[in-house]
Image (cartoon, grey):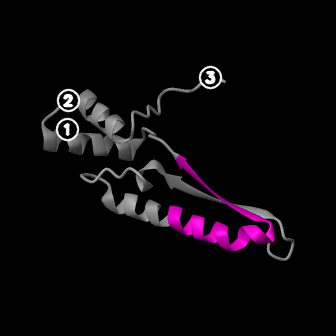
Amino acid sequence: MLARKAGVVIHIGSIQGRLPLYDSTLPYAAAKAGLINYSKGLSKEVSPQGIRVLTVSHGWIMMESSERMMERITDSSRISLDQATQSVMDALGGIDGGTIPTI
């Protein structure tokens, strides 16, 4: 990329890099925060040479590991699954990964 003076680097971040869920995924959040800051620094270094560096931070994605996290929250907080899910949505700024935006 440097030789061609063109290219794009894309890092997959996470909203938790900026809004960590302290009670459940702090190591993950810290790693993503580090990646976000690394991407910003790399961008400042290589963008004058024609290379773009981007970080894409997705919102909530319900998958097997997310379900296990919800179960841990329900067990430790003694709340329902819906309440646990809502507490995570609130902590992430109300992002609902189940909703597909229309364009």
- Could you classify mark 3 by the number of other residues whose Cα lies within 10 Å: few (under 14), some (14-19), or many (20 or more)? few
Secondary structure, mark 3, is loop
- Which residue appears at 76% of the width and 70% of the height? 48
Q: Earlier in the sequence, mark 2 or mark 3?
A: 2
Q: Nearer the viewer, residue 31 or 93?
A: 93
Secondary structure, mark 1, is helix
Q: Which residue is mark 3?
A: 102
Q: CA distance from mark 1 to mark 2?
A: 6 Å
Q: Is residue 77 magenta?
A: no
Query: In screen coordinates, is 99 left or right of 44?
Result: left
Residue 27 found in image quarter: bottom left
Q: Nearer the viewer, residue 65 or 17?
A: 17
- Type of the residue with mark 3: Thr
In this picture, which residue range is highlighted in magenta? 36-57
- Type of the residue with mark 2: Ser
Residue 3 found in image quarter: bottom right
Q: Position of residue 65 (x, y in %)?
A: 37, 47
Q: Determine contact: label 1, label 2, CB under 8 Å.
A: yes
Q: CA distance from mark 3 to mark 1?
A: 32 Å
Q: Which residue is mark 2?
A: 80
Whether 55 is drawn above or below 85: the answer is: below
